[in-house]
C-alpha cells in the first residue's frame, strides 16, 4: 500500500462507555504501485466496541470510483462483516500480482455492486459485476487476451463465475469464448477452473519468440477447446483440438535459430557435443504443465533441418495426431504420428548441389517420447530430363528422358539415413530395363545420382564435376525466382520457364541448350490443359521446337472419371534422325480411394447392386394379408385386379 495519511482518531471513555470514531484521508493512495486516487475512511464504534459503522470511498479527480458502506461486528472471537461495495470504473490493475507470475496484466474497469458478509477473513461475496477494457496475459505462452465489452462476472461465496466471456487475442484478433470460475480461500490460495472454446474458429494460443535456452517457441492456432485449472502457483493447461492456419511451433535443438517462420514444427540439429538431456533453463514458474492433444491438419507445416552444417531441410504439410507434454521443470515429450501430404526437401551439399525435391505423399514421422528419437520414413523426388548416353554406351542417343532422383530418409530424426535411387517414369520397359541393369551397382547408382543433382547429367566412370555443375545451380536458382514472380498466385493459370543445358556425349556429339516453357491452365470447369515446350538456343545442331501437350476432360462432377488426349515427344531420339518423333494417344481413367480389396469391390459395384435390389423390391408386393383378406396391399404403380 502507498499513500500519505492525514486525519484523526478519537476515543472517548466515560464510565465504561466508549465512543470511538475515526476520520482518515489518504492522499496518493495506491496498491502494488498502481495509483488509485484519494482514499477516505470514516468509522464510528458503539459504546461497548462491539459494532462499527464503516463509510469509505476512493475518488480520482473528484469522481467516486469505489465505496464501502456497512457494519463490522466484534461480538464473537472472529469479526463478522456486513458490507455493501459499489464499483464505478474501478481499476483491476492492483490485483495483477494475484496471478503469481503465471497470469499477469490483469486489467480492466469494474462496475456494479457486491455484498460482503460473514467471517472477515473469508467472507461470502455475492453480486453481479461488469467488466470493460478487461483482459489477462499468460507470459509463458506470450499471449494476451482482452475481454468483450460489458462482460459479466457473477459473485457467490468465494467464487468469481465467468459465463460466455468473449476473448480476443491482442496480437491477431482471433476470438474464443471463456467459461468457468476463479476461487479463493481467505483471499489466498487462488485457483482456476476455466474452459475456452473456439467455436470452430482459429484462436491464438501460443506466440513466443526465439530466446536462448528455451524448449520451444513459435506461433500456434487452435480450433477446439482448452482448459486452465489448478492453483495459480501450479497451473495445468490442457488443449484439445486441431491445428489451424498459421500454426508455427518450433523446437530448437541447437543454439542457432533456423529459417522457416511459418512451419508447424521446426527441428534444428544440435551441435555434436550437445545432448538432448541437457536441462533447459526456463523462467521460474512453479509447476506450470502444458498438454497439447492435437489433430494436425494440412494447415500446419512441418520443417526439419536434417543437416545443420549444409542447411538441408525437409518441409511439408500433412495430417496426424500429436500429444505434446511440456512443463516448467524441463519435461518435453512428444507422442504420435505425422503423415506427409505435400512437401519439399531442400538438399544441399558442399556448395555444388542445391536442389529442391518433392516429398512423396504418405511419408511419416513417428514420435514415442523424446523428440529427437522420432522415426523418419520419407521419400522425396527430384525430377529432370537427362541424356542416358553415358550409361547406355551408345553415342548416338541424344534425346533426354524423364529421370527421377529419389532420396529415402529413414531412421532416427537426429541422425537419419539418406539413400539415393534413380527411376525413369514413363520410359519404355526395354530402355528402363537396360538402365536399371547399368545402375544395379549401388556405388554406380549413387555416383550418377550425385552427378544428376550437380550438373543434370549421367556420368561414365572417368568423368568428374565440371563448371556445368555450378552453372546449372545458378540457372535453377534464377529460373525459380522468375517463376515465382510469373506465378502471381493464380490457381487457374501457371506459367514458367527453365533452361536445360546442352551436353557433350562420349562421341563428341553436342546437343544445344534448350529453353523450356511450361503452361498449365484450366480452360473451363471440366477441361484442363498442360503443355511443355523446348526451344533450342545457342546453336544449329537442333532446330526443332519439341514439346508435350496434354488435355484432360473431367467426365463427372467429382473429377474421378477423366478422359485424356496427349501428344508426347518420343523418349529416345537418334542423333542421325532428321526429325523429332512424337507419340499420340487417348486414355480413360477412373480414380477411387480404398483401404482393402473388398472396399474397392464395394465402392465399384455397390451402386449397381443397390440399383438391382431396388428394382427387385419394386416388383414385389410390399405386404399380403392372405387370400381371403378384406384388404390387400399392392405396389402403388400397379393397377388393382378385378374385383371378385
Image (cartoon, rainbow, N blue to C red):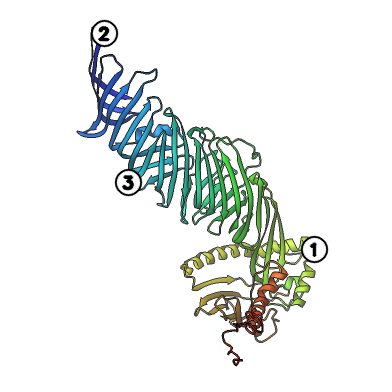
Q: Distance between the Cα atoms at labels 3 and 2? A: 52 Å
Question: Is residue 504 visible in this depiction of the protein?
Answer: no
Above or below: residue 119 compared with residue 172: above
Q: Residue at x 40, y 24 (%)?
A: 121
Q: Looking at the rendering, which quadrant does residue 332 occupy?
A: top right
The residue that mark 2 highlights is: 16
- 3 vs 1, front mark: 3
Q: Residue at x 64, y 73 (%)?
A: 592
Question: Is residue 35 visible in this depiction of the protein?
Answer: yes
Residue 643, position in %: x, y?
59, 91
Above or below: residue 294 compared with residue 342: above
Q: Nearer the viewer, residue 537 or 96?
A: 96
Residue 335: mark in rendering? none
Q: Distance between the Cα atoms at labels 1 and 2? A: 113 Å
Q: Residue at x 49, y 55 (%)?
A: 246
Residue 353, position in %: x, y?
63, 59
The residue that mark 3 highlights is: 150
Q: Are marks 3 and 1 in contact (CB under 8 Å)?
A: no
Above or below: residue 147 compared with residue 39: below
The residue that mark 1 highlights is: 441
Q: Earlier in the sequence, mark 3 or mark 1?
A: 3
Q: Residue at x 35, y 18 (%)?
A: 75
**Quadrant assignment for the N terminus:** top left
Q: Looking at the rendering, which quadrant does residue 635 occupy?
A: bottom right
Residue 581, position in %: x, y?
66, 85
Q: Is residue 114 left or right of residue 279?
A: left
Q: Residue furthest bottom?
A: 642
Q: Residue furthest left?
A: 62
Amino acid at each position: 500500500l502507498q499513500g500519505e495519511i492525514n486525519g484523526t482518531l478519537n476515543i472517548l471513555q466515560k464510565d465504561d462507555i466508549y465512543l470511538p470514531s475515526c476520520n482518515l484521508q489518504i492522499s496518493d493512495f495506491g496498491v502494488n504501485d498502481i495509483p488509485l486516487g484519494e482514499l477516505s475512511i470514516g468509522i464510528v464504534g458503539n459504546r461497548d466496541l462491539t459494532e462499527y459503522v464503516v463509510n469509505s470511498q476512493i475518488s480520482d479527480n473528484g469522481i467516486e470510483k469505489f465505496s464501502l458502506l456497512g457494519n463490522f461486528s466484534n461480538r464473537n472471537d472472529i469479526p463478522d462483516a456486513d458490507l455493501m461495495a459499489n464499483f464505478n470504473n474501478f481499476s483491476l490493475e492492483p490485483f495483477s500480482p494475484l496471478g503469481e507470475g503465471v497470469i499477469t496484466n490483469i486489467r480492466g474497469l469494474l462496475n456494479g455492486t457486491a455484498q460482503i458478509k460473514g467471517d472477515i477473513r473469508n467472507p461470502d461475496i455475492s453480486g453481479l459485476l461488469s467488466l470493460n477494457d478487461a483482459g489477462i496475459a499468460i507470459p509463458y505462452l506470450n499471449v494476451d487476451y482482452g475481454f468483450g465489452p460489458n462482460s459479466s462476472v457473477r459473485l457467490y461465496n468465494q467464487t468469481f463465475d465467468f459465463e460466455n466471456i468473449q476473448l480476443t487475442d491482442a496480437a491477431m484478433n482471433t476470438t474464443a469464448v471463456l467459461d468457468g470460475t476463479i476461487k479463493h480461500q481467505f483471499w489466498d490460495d487462488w485457483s482456476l477452473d476455466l474452459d475456452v472454446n473456439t467455436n470452430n474458429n482459429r484462436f491464438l494460443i501460443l506466440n513466443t519468440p526465439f530466446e536462448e535456452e528455451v524448449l520451444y517457441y513459435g506461433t500456434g492456432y487452435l480450433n477446439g477447446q482448452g482448459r486452465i485449472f489448478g492453483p495459480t502457483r501450479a497451473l495445468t493447461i490442457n488443449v484439445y483440438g486441431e491445428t489451424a492456419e498459421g500454426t508455427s511451433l518450433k523446437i530448437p535443438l541447437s543454439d542457432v535459430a533456423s529459417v522457416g517462420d511459418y512451419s508447424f514444427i521446426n527441428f534444428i540439429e544440435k551441435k555434436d557435443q550437445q545432448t538432448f538431456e541437457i536441462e533447459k533453463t526456463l523462467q521460474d514458474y512453479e509447476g506450470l504443465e502444458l498438454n497439447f492433444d492435437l489433430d494436425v491438419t494440412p494447415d500446419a507445416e512441418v520443417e526439419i533441418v536434417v543437416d545443420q552444417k549444409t542447411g538441408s531441410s525437409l518441409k511439408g504439410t500433412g495430417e496426424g495426431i500429436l500429444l505434446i507434454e511440456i512443463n516448467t521443470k524441463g519435461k518435453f515429450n512428444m507422442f504420435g504420428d505425422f503423415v506427409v501430404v505435400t512437401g519439399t526437401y531442400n538438399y544441399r551439399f558442399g556448395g555444388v548441389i542445391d536442389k529442391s525435391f518433392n516429398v512423396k505423399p504418405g511419408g511419416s514421422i513417428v514420435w514415442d517420447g523424446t523428440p529427437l528419437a522420432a522415426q523418419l520414413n520419407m521419400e522425396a523426388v527430384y525430377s529432370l530430363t537427362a541424356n542416358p548416353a553415358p550409361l547406355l554406351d551408345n553415342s548416338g542417343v541424344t534425346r533426354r528422358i524423364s529421370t527421377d532422383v529419389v532420396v529415402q530418409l529413414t531412421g532416427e530424426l537426429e541422425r537419419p539415413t539418406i539413400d539415393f535411387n534413380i527411376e525413369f517414369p514413363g520410359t519404355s520397359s526395354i530402355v528402363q530395363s537396360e538402365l536399371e541393369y547399368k545402375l544395379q551397382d549401388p556405388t554406380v547408382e549413387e555416383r550418377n545420382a550425385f552427378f544428376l543433382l550437380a550438373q543434370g547429367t549421367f556420368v561414365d566412370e572417368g568423368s568428374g564435376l565440371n563448371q556445368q555443375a555450378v552453372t546449372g545451380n545458378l540457372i535453377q536458382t534464377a529460373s525459380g525466382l522468375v517463376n515465382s514472380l510469373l506465378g502471381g498466385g493464380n490457381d487457374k493459370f501457371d506459367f514458367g520457364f527453365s533452361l536445360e543445358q546442352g551436353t557433350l556425349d562420349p562421341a563428341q556429339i553436342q546437343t544445344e541448350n534448350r529453353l523450356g516453357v511450361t503452361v498449365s491452365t484450366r480452360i473451363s470447369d471440366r477441361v484442363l490443359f498442360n503443355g511443355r515446350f523446348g526451344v533450342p538456343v545457342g546453336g544449329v545442331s537442333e532446330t526443332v521446337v519439341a514439346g508435350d501437350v496434354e488435355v484432360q476432360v473431367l467426365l463427372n462432377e467429382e473429377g474421378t472419371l477423366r478422359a485424356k488426349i496427349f501428344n508426347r515427344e518420343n523418349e529416345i531420339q537418334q542423333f542421325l534422325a532428321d526429325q523429332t518423333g512424337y507419340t499420340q494417344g487417348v486414355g480413360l481413367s477412373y480414380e477411387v480411394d480404398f483401404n482393402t480389396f473388398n472396399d474397392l469391390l464395394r465402392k465399384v459395384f455397390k451402386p449397381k447392386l443397390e440399383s438391382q435390389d431396388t428394382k427387385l423390391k419394386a416388383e414385389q408386393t410390399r405386404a399380403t394379408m392372405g387370400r381371403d383378406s378384406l384388404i390387400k396391399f399392392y405396389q402403388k404403380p400397379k393397377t388393382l385386379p378385378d374385383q371378385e
